[in-house]
Amino acid sequence: MQHDTGNSEQSARQISSRCISLPKMKTPNSKSDTNRVVSLVPLHERAPDIFETSKALTAPSALEATLANVVDLLPSLVQMRHGIISLFNGAGIPDMIVGTGWTEGSHERHRKHLPRAAIDQIITTGMALVAENIAVDPAFNAADKDVLGASDNMKVSFIGVPIRVDANVVGTLTIDRILDNKSASLLDYDLRLLTTIANLVGQTVKVHRLFASDRERLMAEKVRMQKQFGELKQPGREGKRAHIKGIIGDSPALRGLLEKVALVARSNSTVLLRGESGTGKELVAKAVHELSGRARRPFIKLNCAALPETVLESELFGHEKGAFTSAFNSRKGRFELADKGTLFLDEIGEISASFQAKLLRVLQEQEFERVGSNQTIKVDVRVIAATNRNLEDAVARNEFRADLYYRISVVPLLVPPLRERRSDIPLLAAEFLDNFNRENGRTVVFDASATEVLMNCAFPGNVRELENCVQRTATLSAGASIIRSDFDCYHGRCLSAILWKHASKETVPKSEPTAPSPLNPALQSPGDFASAAFGTPPVYSEQALPAPVRVSLASAKMTDRERLISAMERSGWVQAKAARLLGLTPRQIGYALRKYGIEIKRL
């Protein structure tokens, strides 16, 4: 504390030459003097105030919330109208501004109260700036005076001190107030007090930045270790893979996932399953549970997107009798039911910001209170979360808490989309058809041409869409076997193709759609040609072409290249006309001509 007081007095002596000269304080020698002059309390006697400030700075919370607590304490320490703590990045641009009454999203409101010229002077010189009346002080330009509301009728005082991390100025602590006899006499004292507080803030900022740097380094190390681990093959493990009920396939992507599932199941770490809708994240979560030491304990699941926030809190934490209107009896929540077992939280990216804070505390402490109760309940629950959202983007947009993201993303597992495991499509389709036959007492089988159609489909809805496609086609099939013409896409009625563009925008990070296999001659429409040439599912239109032209250009014996040449010849080698014939854009036609190496003829 003595060190901080010494720094405070040194900073007080280093006031910029453009600031006012502070008057000497007089000792009251009369009754009138006593009323006019305020008795100053020595800084060492304000230890309780400094203690409260240091307590606020060491509270376990985010840096912005910590600084907001300090600003909220300032009115009890000094006379002030506005108080602001500003932190700057390396380019000198404010990246954190916290003022009196701070809330999330109030950054711009507090920015308006910053006198930029004065702040720039403090940052540049590294010295405090004190102005008894900013209207006559050369350090404040007209814009600064307007920001602080100074005028001939309203005199405003200003105190600003630098916040340092080591030898670097990283921000400022500033206050302003209406000038009166009392505030004028307190300038020197308030300067020393604010300088002491700024020193404490600087140490807190340093600790938070070191913590953030260490966290980023550890996250990068975790990613590097996971990547290195994936590249290593342990002796004696080749040819072995975990067999998990309900998960079908033998593709390299699926084998890699199942090997990781077997390893993750050995620990109690929180798991975050990433993947598109319909990839089977719930099955993977069930597999982690069944391969773990908690297999004999409950596996409880909850879809967070299916319930409003008020109901979600009761579902997860339970409630007491009378906690709300329809709470006629006490009820255990999902966390309590999953004690000693596993809780699967699907669509965790859809929960509200306020509920994220409640969930974070339970994940950290493994304890909670039922709705309507103040009794703390401790549990031992392994949490597996799942989402198809890009949580990194959500964190950047302040839609998802960063601390909750790090808490649930201890072991992230990416569930591959079906287009990255095409060799599994025949196995999955056969399983779905067997299920259909058992449930409906039929003996339908796939023809070779039917399997070929399935292998060439993009399936933006993944395994769920494949299952629906098999059931729909088997239901409408009139014969004993499913052939190419039984599929809706053969007749241009596949509605999933229309949804492709929307589905592709909602994929998980670094999991972009890959182009499907080259078009099979069985797919006979201009939209099919677009699918093969440009790697997107066909979008069919009954009015795309007149019927005679469509049949002529879609012969089953023609290759994609021949179909393109035929369209160009019919249109006189005019790309725009050929595009209309094939239901494409001229740009797509140009791309296809280059792809197939077709030289344009000049007629």
Image (cartoon, rainbow, N blue to C red):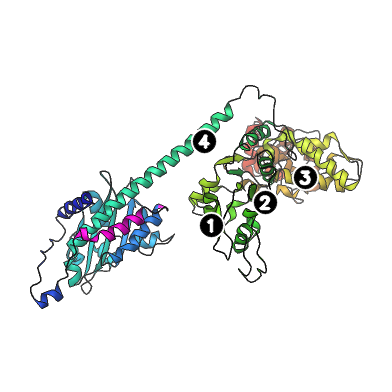
Q: In the rendered structure, which disc, 3 or 1, sits on the residue that comes first in sequence?
A: 1
Q: Which of pointers 4 and 1 lies earlier in the amino acid sequence? A: 4
Q: For the residue marked with disc 2, what is the amino acid?
A: Lys
Asked which secondary structure carries label 2, the reply is strand
Q: Which mark is residue 301?
A: 2
Decide if residue 326 is in sight here: yes
Residue 511 placement, left or right of 393: right
Q: Residues in magenta?
A: 41-62
Between the C-alphas of marks 4 and 1, the distance is 28 Å
Q: Nearer the viewer, residue 525 or 225?
A: 225
What number is the disc on residue 223?
4
Coordinates of residue 194 in the picture (x, y in percent)? 25, 58
Q: Cβ–Cβ below 8 Å for labels 2 and 4?
A: no
Q: Which mark is residue 358?
A: 1
Q: Nearer the viewer, mark 3 or mark 1?
A: 1
Q: Residue at x 10, y 71 (%)?
A: 28
